[in-house]
Amino acid sequence: ADCLPVLLSAGSAVAALHCGWRPLADGIIGEGVEALRELGAEGPVSAVIGPGARGCCYEVGEDRFEHFAHVPDARAGERNLDLPAVARHDLSAAGVAEVHDLGLCTICRPDVFFSHRADGGVTGRQAGVVWRA
């Protein structure tokens, strides 16, 4: 419940991406934008970054930063990984100009969200929805 949902929309196509650190390291955002294009999406792609682990709270081991050395803002402080910064970087690299980031952290907002990390691994789930309008 701490991975970022990244929702994409372009023309008649939509996609919902599950962006934890591993999928981000494996290039899920570029692949998601490419998949939209393969589905026939034309025009600009827009994105929304939903609630998830953020640089304010997401402390990780040094080995995780090796995957994101190409992202200048990936490190937040000494030991925190900023997943939304990685997502924004990858969205920009994929040509997505319109990005809306909700700015919500699942770890430091237990009053609103479930968090695997904050709840010690036993927690509920969030859901995200994207549709054509």
Image: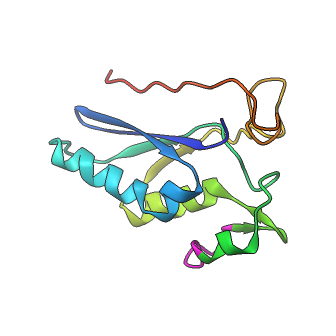
Residue found at x 78% / y 42%: 117
Give the image quarter of residue 61: bottom right
29 versus 17 height, above or below: below
Give the image quarter of residue 29: bottom left
**Side (left or right) of 47 relative to 82:** left
Q: Position of residue 99 (x, y in %)?
A: 50, 47
Q: Quadrant of the N terminus?
A: top right
**Side (left or right) of 34 relative to 85:** left
Foreground residue, 67 or 41? Answer: 67
Q: How many marks?
A: 0
**Residue located farthest toward the top when viewing the structure as drawn:** 133
Foreground residue, 52 or 93? Answer: 52
Q: Position of residue 101 (x, y in %)?
A: 60, 44
Residue found at x 52% / y 27%: 128
Can residue 47 be seen?
Answer: yes
Residue found at x 41% / y 55%: 28
Can residue 96 be seen?
Answer: no
Magenta stretch bounds? 67-74
Residue found at x 33% / y 21%: 133
Give the image quarter of residue 118: top right
Foreground residue, 47 or 126? Answer: 126
Secondary structure mostly seen in magenta is: loop
Q: How is the image coloured?
A: rainbow
Q: Position of residue 116 (x, y in %)?
A: 73, 37
**Side (left or right) of 86 relative to 26:** right
Whether the magenta-drawn stretch holds residue 54 is answered as: no
**Side (left or right) of 128 relative to 10:** right
